[in-house]
Image (cartoon, rainbow, N blue to C red):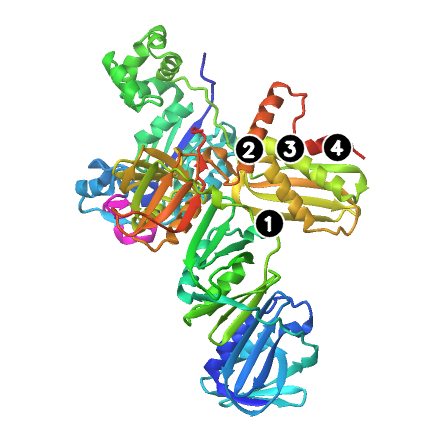
């Protein structure tokens, strides 16, 4: 398995992001040790300047411990929303370099600039340009790692910190990689590191010298991945996550409709289609909207915010129907109806449960219906109202 | 009609009456405030077919009469006047309003087109104004703001003899507050559903002068409140309120008590890193409550506070808004969480001291957020 040739991957990582952002508003603290966190004893460090890190302060450490390590540090209270706002602007800028941007967190991203080189010059020129732009436009330091894949690019940016740039030319990948301790590797956490140390493996070079079979025997599939990485092979593409902000379903009637029952049943059906797709994509909606087009093609959109985000078909349908009822009586017959789930969030963040047991039972029924239609794609499960004969 | 009154007294009365007027009055006369003089008293009234308000102020009356004048305009004028005596006087089809060196002329509307205001129903009993205001503010946080479910935008008021119970829910949390009052008859059993917004307005503007009289109409369609020189009536919400008292868990093997202010602060801080509405996780272990928010890839925050736990360790997640709105409704130093199990609602009650029993006159029930890795 060979690494794809000619790829140029950049890893852009902001240096001590929260601290750097605060320094813009606190110029008097530039050059001083700074910790961002609430000064309370039981709070934790959100970010620390590099001189604090050198003394062992790291994020998520209790503030009391951090202050003990660095008593002279200046404590700055974090401001809600400030960091994500700046992050959004930085990410928007990175998207002007290439659409191939994979945002990893609030302060780091991978860029595949392979396709941008003809216009913007080599990866080194692009990396310099990005660092200069972030410094000049936002007043923030960023480190950039450049390599032929994400794994090495990330190691390179870490190597470059603070406020630097490391270029690992493809032919020098192994040379760069093999001098690093094995603990720096992606996928080597505390437990794996202990096991590797027990095998006498401390550096990436030593890991690369191990036969793959031995690593697979010891670590299973993870061992195979480690072996590939130790040889500098990582084919994971840069995946621009296109966050879908809304999801909708529409229906155009074959003849214009005025019958309230028919229209509401269509909204119910559309709501169920939207709900099913939401659940398949593991999203929840914080807003529901409807769209309708009259006979004369004039349109109306209505939407509302929900008290709690939902992925339930029946909740979305009933919100859509209630929005529709507010428009009653209709000015004209309707040619098109649409239901939209808006302001989507990841359902991995959790689903607000309802005190109403009926809501939870409905949710469970919908989950089972999803499983059935997964297994028997041609079946259709849904509310009994769907069974009514159509006009 | 002609009378004189201090600016403060008039401005206060006008602004209170104008508050109950409809934004878009169903008929032009309902944009007006009806001002009537009567034996040394000036009466101001407003009505929007749903809510009526009525206030009486003493004034120096030199000519009896009544007028109907735009409430919004009169409120804006009286608010801007200098501190001095105001004289209102009819001049043909207009009124003149003079205060210090300012003078205004306003058009009036025909008094005989103004509808008759509903009479205050029979007084059923009295409530302590301050306790009433506190109770309403405690339950109102849980009322729904979604007008598509009108029943849940209301507060359910249940009266059993000398006990009034206020209930509100938006399907994700439920607040219940019990309050003793003094009914006029010793045996009374009734209930009504009133818009949360209306009840909140009553609590804000009628509870500061001690006693609040509660009036309930015989047909169950109207409610009235009277305090000192103010009274208001409101139509009630029609509709079946869900039976929600049974949602309070009867058996809660897990109890955890924390200092209210400490938890409020901790929730506030931990939610800094969380996007709006992402849940705050709470892990109760012996002696400690650890809160955290944020997901692996984004910023994370963690904080621990002291907690007295009885029963098994429990991890549960809440919408930070639902949690902090509930916590802020307690005025006790401590708050107790009572759990059945993680996916079941948590009940919050107040507690004065760490080693005391909890008080149950106010209870806030909140449904947790189900995290994907827990079922």
Query: Disc 4 versus disc 3: distance between alpha carbons?
Result: 18 Å
In the image, are marks 4 and 1 on the same chain?
Answer: no
Q: Which residue is mark 4?
A: A388
Q: Which residue is mark 3?
A: A273
Q: Mark 2 falls on what kind of element?
A: helix
Camera-nearest label, 4 or 3: 4
Could you tell which of marks 4 and 3 lies nearer the N-terminus? Answer: 3
Q: Which residues are magenta?
A: A22-42
Residue drawn at x 28%, y 42% is: B307
Q: Which mark is residue A361?
A: 2
Query: Disc 4 versus disc 1: distance between alpha carbons?
Result: 29 Å
Camera-nearest label, 4 or 1: 1
Can the viewer see residue B8? yes
Tag 3 subunit? A
Q: Mark 3 falls on what kind of element?
A: helix
The one of A211 and B77 positioned closer to us in this rendering: B77
Q: Position of residue A390 (x, y in %)?
A: 78, 33
Quadrant containing the C terminus of chain B in the rendered view? top left
Q: Which mark is residue A154?
A: none
Furthest-bottom residue in this view? B62
Q: Position of residue A172 (x, y in %)?
A: 35, 20
In the displayed structure, B56 sits above or below A192; it is below
Q: Mark 4 falls on what kind of element?
A: loop
Q: Circle 1: is it few (<14), some (14-19), or many (20+) Cα within 10 Å?
A: few
Q: Which residue is mark 1?
A: B240
Tag 1 subunit? B
Could you tell which of marks 2 and 3 lies nearer the N-terminus? Answer: 3
Query: Disc 3 versus disc 1: distance between alpha carbons?
Result: 31 Å
């Amino acid at each position: 398995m060979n690494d794809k040739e000619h790829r140029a991957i950049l890893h852009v990582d902001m240096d001590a992001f929260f601290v750097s952002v605060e320094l813009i508003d606190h110029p008097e603290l530039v050059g001083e040790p700074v910790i961002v966190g609430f000064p309370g004893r039981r709070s934790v460090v959100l970010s620390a300047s590099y001189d604090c890190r050198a003394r062992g302060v790291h994020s998520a450490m209790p503030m009391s411990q951090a202050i003990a390590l660095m008593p002279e540090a200046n404590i700055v209270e974090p401001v809600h929303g400030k960091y994500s706002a700046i992050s959004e602007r930085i990410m928007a800028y990175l998207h002007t370099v290439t659409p191939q941007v994979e945002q990893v967190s609030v302060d780091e991203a991978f860029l595949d600039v392979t396709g941008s080189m003809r216009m913007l010059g080599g990866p080194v020129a692009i990396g310099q340009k990005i660092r200069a732009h972030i410094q000049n436009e936002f007043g923030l330091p960023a480190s950039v790692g450049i390599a032929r894949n994400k794994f090495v690019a990330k190691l390179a940016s870490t190597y470059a910190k603070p406020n630097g740039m490391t270029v690992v030319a493809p032919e020098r990948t192994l040379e760069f990689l093999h001098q690093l301790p094995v603990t720096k590797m992606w996928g080597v956490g505390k437990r794996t590191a202990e096991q590797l140390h027990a095998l006498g493996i401390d550096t990436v070079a030593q890991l690369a010298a191990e036969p793959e079979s031995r690593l697979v025997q010891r670590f299973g599939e993870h061992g195979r991945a480690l072996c590939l990485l130790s040889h500098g092979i990582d084919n994971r593409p840069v995946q621009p996550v296109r966050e879908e902000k809304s999801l909708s379903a529409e229906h155009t009637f074959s003849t214009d409709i005025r019958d309230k029952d028919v229209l509401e049943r269509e909204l119910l059906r559309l709501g169920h289609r939207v709900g099913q797709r939401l659940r398949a994509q593991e999203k929840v909606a914080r807003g529901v909207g409807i769209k309708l087009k009259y006979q004369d093609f004039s349109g109306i959109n209505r939407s509302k915010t929900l008290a709690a985000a939902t992925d339930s078909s029946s909740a979305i349908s009933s919100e859509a129907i209630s929005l529709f009822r507010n428009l009653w009586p209709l000015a004209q017959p309707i040619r098109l109806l649409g239901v939209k789930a808006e302001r989507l969030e990841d359902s991995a963040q959790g689903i607000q449960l309802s005190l109403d047991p009926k809501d939870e039972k409905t949710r469970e029924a919908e989950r089972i219906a999803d499983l059935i239609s997964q297994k028997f794609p041609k079946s259709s499960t849904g509310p009994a109202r769907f069974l009514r004969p159509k006009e | 009609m002609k009378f004189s009154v201090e600016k403060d007294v008039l401005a206060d009365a006008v602004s209170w009456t104008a508050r109950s007027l409809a934004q878009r009055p169903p008929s032009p006369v309902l944009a007006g405030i009806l001002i009537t003089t009567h034996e040394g008293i000036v009466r101001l009234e407003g009505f929007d077919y749903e809510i009526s308000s009525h206030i009486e102020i003493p004034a120096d009356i030199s000519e009896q009469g009544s007028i109907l004048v735009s409430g919004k305009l009169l409120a804006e004028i009286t608010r801007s006047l200098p501190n001095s005596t105001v004289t209102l006087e009819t001049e043909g089809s207009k009124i003149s309003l003079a205060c210090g060196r300012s003078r205004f002329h306003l058009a009036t509307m025909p008094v005989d087109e103004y509808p008759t205001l509903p009479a205050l129903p029979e007084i059923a009993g009295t409530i302590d104004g301050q306790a009433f205001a506190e109770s309403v503010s405690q339950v109102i946080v849980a009322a729904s703001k979604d007008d598509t479910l009108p029943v849940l935008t209301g507060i359910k008021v249940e009266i059993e003899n000398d006990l009034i119970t206020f209930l509100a829910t938006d399907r994700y949390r439920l607040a219940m507050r019990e309050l003793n009052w003094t009914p006029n008859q010793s045996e009374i059993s009734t209930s009504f559903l009133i818009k949360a917004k209306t009840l909140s307005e009553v609590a804000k503007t009628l509870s500061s002068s001690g006693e609040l009289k509660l009036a309930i109409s015989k047909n169950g369609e109207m409610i009235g409140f009277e305090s000192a020189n103010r009274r208001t009536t409101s139509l009630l919400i029609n509709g079946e309120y869900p039976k929600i008292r049974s949602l309070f868990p009867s058996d809660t093997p897990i109890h955890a008590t924390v200092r209210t202010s400490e938890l409020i602060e901790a929730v506030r801080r931990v939610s800094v890193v969380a996007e709006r509405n992402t849940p705050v996780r709470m892990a109760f272990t012996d002696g400690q409550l650890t809160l955290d928010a944020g997901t692996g890839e984004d910023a994370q925050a963690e904080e621990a506070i002291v907690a007295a736990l009885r029963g098994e360790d429990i991890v549960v997640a809440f919408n930070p808004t639902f949690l902090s709105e509930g916590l802020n409704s307690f005025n006790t130093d401590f708050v107790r969480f009572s759990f059945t199990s993680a996916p079941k609602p948590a009940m919050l009650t107040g507690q004065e001291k760490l080693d005391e029993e909890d008080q149950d006159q106010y209870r806030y029930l909140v449904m947790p957020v189900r995290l994907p890795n827990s079922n």
